Image: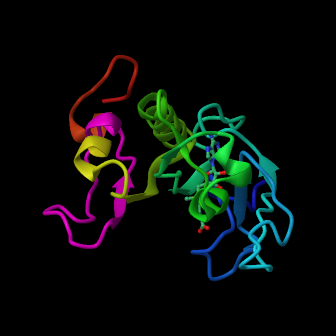
Amino acid sequence: MDDKFILDACCGPKMFWFNKNHPNVLYCDLRERKKGFIDTRPNREVKPDMIMDFTKMSFSDKSFKLVVFDPPHLIGKEREYGKGSRMIQHYGCLNAETWQSDIKKGFEECWRVLEDYGILIFKWNDASKKRAELLRIIGREPLFGHPNGSKIPTHWFCFMKIPDFVLGKNPVGEKQ
Ligand SMILES: C[S@@+](CC[C@H](N)C(=O)[O-])C[C@H]1O[C@@H](n2cnc3c(N)ncnc32)[C@H](O)[C@@H]1O
């Protein structure tokens, strides 16, 4: 896996990728869907390299240089994956009861598997839950994105995993 130094933690139909089969990217998702699962877009498919739950990843710490995290942002019911709105069939949904802890665990896993000074790109859409609530749940400050809000509901946040000893926090066991 040495050549797979970029992780897409929940690739879905890979809509935002210019190259949907980039040799240096490991595409993961919780599910797989065959071509035609969205009847209006017959070429769409969900075909991850690996089926994986972003709340409990199987990778060692610090395995990737870049992680992209674009979790579902609509609240829905699991069963809607099969027959609900097209948006939910296409992009999945969050669980109404557990979404905060799911997103927090997912973010923490992305952080854990990122190497020091690695970059985490987080994409969020304000449709169901506002970005202020999301950032509070994550508990880390992005370097840049949309600090003053935006009329556009889709937000891209850039985080860098700057080690705590560099930030001056100096947790136990870290070098000084
Ligand atoms: C917004 S879509 C990703 C869209 C993708 N970035 C694109 O460019 O098309 C979110 C994806 O997260 C997946 N997902 C939801 N919960 C997950 C989990 N716990 N672990 C891994 N993937 C999950 C869904 O199956 C869905 O495909």
Determine which quarter of the picture holds residue 122. bottom left
Q: Residue 28 location in percent, x, y? A: 71, 53
Determine which quarter of the picture holds residue 42. bottom right
Determine which quarter of the picture holds residue 173. top left
- Which residue is at 21% across, 72% downward? 151
Q: Residue 57 location in percent, x, y? A: 66, 36
Question: In the figure, 15 relative to 118: above or below?
Answer: below
Seen in the image, is 13 located left or right of residue 165?
A: right
- Which residue is at 68% across, 38% downward? 53
Could you tell me what secondary structure mostly forms the magenta stretch?
Answer: loop
Seen in the image, is 116 located left or right of residue 60?
A: left
The number of discs equals 0
* Residue 162 counted in the magenta span: yes
Q: Residue 124 location in percent, x, y? A: 40, 57
- Which residue is at 66% across, 58% downward? 89
- Hey, which residue is sitting farthest left in the picture? 148
Q: In the rendered view of the protein, which quadrant contains the C terminus?
A: top left
In the rendered view, how is the structure colored? rainbow
Is 134 or 174 nearer to us in this picture? 134
Seen in the image, is 8 located left or right of residue 170?
A: right
Q: Residue 172 location in percent, x, y? A: 34, 17
Is 40 or 167 nearer to us in this picture? 40
* Residue 120 counted in the magenta span: no
Seen in the image, is 63 located left or right of residue 74?
A: right
Is 135 or 85 nearer to us in this picture? 85
- Which residue is at 20% across, 69% downward? 150
Specify start and end residues of the magenta stretch as a single range: 136-163
